[in-house]
Image (cartoon, rainbow, N blue to C red):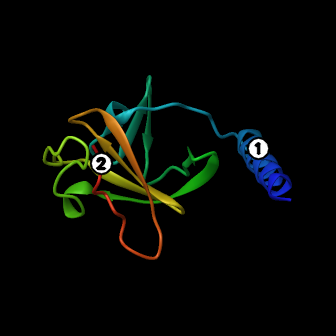
Amino acid sequence: MQDEEKDEEKDEEKSKKERLVAEGYEGVKFKASNFKAGYKLQQGDVEYDLQAKDLHIEFDGDVRQLVAVFDAQGYLRECPMCHMKCPEGSMVILTDHHMLYPCWMCNKLIERLTGDEDVDWSGLE
């Protein structure tokens, strides 16, 4: 029974991806260095304004919609991976399911689930 539910969820996510592509969304892969100050995502010659663009991110096999993007310095003191101070202009991206911090210092994308409580950025090594 559980396997059937998992298969249905995978089919649902696949359908969601197919619907987004049919609506004109582009599939792009990005790394921390693609995120620029001013809430921008640079992909080749194209620059996306994350505050104006409807963005979906795949996380744990699910397609998640961008809800907000905000200044990392107001939320994090330092990167939870490399422990370097969050640079000016760095950001945290919030989806309906998780948070993403693209660290420019260690060039890693740090993702954490959100829930009823504050996001736990600690414990990363």
Toward which corner of the image does residue 33 lie, by quadrant?
Answer: top left
What SS does tag 2 mark? Answer: loop
Q: Residue furthest left?
A: 85
Quadrant location of the C terminus? Answer: top left
Q: Amino acid at mark 2?
A: Leu
Q: Position of residue 82 (x, y in %)?
A: 20, 40
Is 101 on the left-hand or right-hand side of 88? right
Q: Which mark is residue 68?
A: none
Residue at x 25%, y 50% (from the top left corner): 80
Does 99 appear above or below 48? below
Q: Amino acid at mark 1?
A: Lys
Is 72 on the left-hand or right-hand side of 83? right
Does 106 appear above or below 123? above
Q: Pick the residue in front: 35 or 32.
A: 32
Toward which corner of the image does residue 114 lie, by quadrant?
Answer: bottom left
Residue at x 40%, y 75% (from the top left corner): 117
Check whether the beta carbons of the residues at disc 2 and disc 1 lie within 8 A of each other: no
Q: Position of residue 98 (x, y in %)?
A: 47, 58
Q: Position of residue 74 (x, y in %)?
A: 21, 63
Toward which corner of the image does residue 28 lie, by quadrant?
Answer: top right
Sequence-earlier tag: 2 or 1? 1
Q: Pick the residue in front: 120 or 33.
A: 120
Is 9 on the left-hand or right-hand side of 96? right
Q: Which mark is residue 14?
A: 1
* Crowd class of label 2 (few under 14; some 14 to 19; many from 20; radius 10 Å): few
Query: What distance separates the C-alpha of mark 2 from that of mark 1?
Result: 31 Å
Look at mark 2 in the image and give the residue it sits on.
124
Mark 2 vs mark 1, foreground winner is 2
